[in-house]
């Protein structure tokens, strides 16, 4: 998984695409509930299925994802497919981005139904601490999952992950992308057990993504592979398109508002988002 540069992102999400994303941000902000006592009562949220539609509209494509299909959206020329996820960035007390990883994106979750190497289950491989075999089968499942897309859509040239990373404290959304190399299966490299000295519960996989930008792990209990990003490094290295999510979030106890006052508040907030858009 290779991060897209800001220029590469801007070629996919050109000016018109970014305008559509700002339009959807404005609509979401307008629908955001008002806090009663303090700002922490509410924060900006985007349901994942809404984010898929945002991207489909922004690139003039169509949603095709259903169930466990690997991609969510095709572009209008069927030249690329993409999987969409909404992640939350972790922050410091100051509100700045932390150097730690984001929330997770599941990238493979068939493990409970798949027969692993030598007829062993994933649980058995973990119990026997067969780290290399866990990584090898994780790699195989991921490669086969995405490589099969080209059989269904032969004109696809690229497959991407697109992420909307929410940084509520600073009123920002970072749009980032990863280009997936699914033409050549990567080497296993050096997978690492997590938390040495305790029972093996997860394995950090190698050769999926540069450690500076994220990590991929296979989990025993969850029976799936998860990707986590490092938003601070993506932002610091200029690998994101950035959108604002500012609005007036002053406290309001709406039970004290009559109909006329609520209508005026509705009009005021609608106008505010119109100006932001």
Image: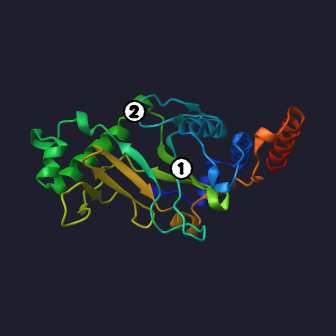
Compare residues 61 and 66 and report the one nearer the observer.
66
Question: For residue 81, which numbered disc appears in the image?
Answer: none
Q: Position of residue 163 (x, y in %)?
A: 53, 49
Which of the two residues, 249 or 196, is positioned nearer the viewer here?
Answer: 249
**Residue to which mark 1 is pinned:** 163
Q: Quadrant of the N terminus?
A: bottom left
Dot 2 falls on a residue whose secondary structure is: loop
Q: For this rendering, which residue is in front, 14 or 248? A: 248
What SS does tag 1 mark? strand
Q: Earlier in the sequence, mark 2 or mark 1?
A: 2
Q: Residue at x 39, y 45 (%)?
A: 106
Residue 260: name its quadrant: top right
Q: Vertically, is 24 above or below 259?
A: below
Q: Is residue 43 visible?
A: no
Residue neighbourhood size for the residue with mark 1, other residues' Cα within 10 Å, grouped as few (<14), some (14–19), many (≥20): many
Q: Which mark is residue 68?
A: 2
| Residue 226 on image: x %, y % | 37, 50
Q: Is residue 13 left or right of residue 48?
A: right
Q: Position of residue 140 (x, y in %)?
A: 26, 45
Residue beneath the point at 54% across and 69% down: 92
Total marks shown come to: 2
């Amino acid at each position: 998984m290779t991060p897209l540069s800001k220029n590469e992102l801007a070629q996919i999400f050109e000016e018109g695409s970014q305008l559509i994303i700002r339009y959807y941000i404005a609509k979401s902000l307008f629908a955001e509930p008002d806090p009663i006592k303090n700002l922490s009562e509410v924060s900006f949220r985007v349901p994942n299925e809404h984010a898929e539609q945002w991207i489909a509209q922004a690139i003039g494509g169509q949603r095709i994802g259903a169930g466990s299909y690997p991609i969510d959206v095709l572009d209008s020329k069927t030249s690329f497919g993409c999987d969409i996820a909404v992640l939350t960035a972790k922050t410091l007390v100051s509100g700045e981005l932390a150097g730690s990883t984001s929330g997770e994106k599941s990238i493979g979750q068939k493990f409970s139904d798949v027969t692993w190497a030598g007829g062993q289950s994933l649980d058995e491989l973990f119990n026997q601490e067969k780290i290399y075999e866990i990584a090898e089968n994780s790699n195989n499942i991921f490669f086969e999952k995405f490589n099969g897309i080209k059989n269904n859509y032969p004109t696809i040239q690229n497959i991407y992950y697109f992420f909307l990373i929410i940084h509520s404290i600073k009123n920002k959304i970072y749009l980032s992308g990863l280009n997936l190399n699914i033409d050549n299966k990567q080497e296993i490299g050096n997978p690492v057990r997590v938390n040495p000295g305790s029972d093996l519960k997860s394995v950090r996989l190698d050769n999926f993504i540069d450690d500076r930008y994220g990590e991929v792990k296979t989990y025993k209990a969850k029976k799936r592979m998860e990707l986590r990003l490092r938003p601070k490094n993506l932002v610091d290295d200029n690998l994101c398109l950035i959108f604002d999510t500012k609005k007036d979030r002053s406290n309001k106890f709406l039970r004290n508002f009559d109909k006329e006052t609520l209508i005026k508040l509705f009009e005021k907030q609608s106008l505010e988002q119109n100006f932001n858009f």
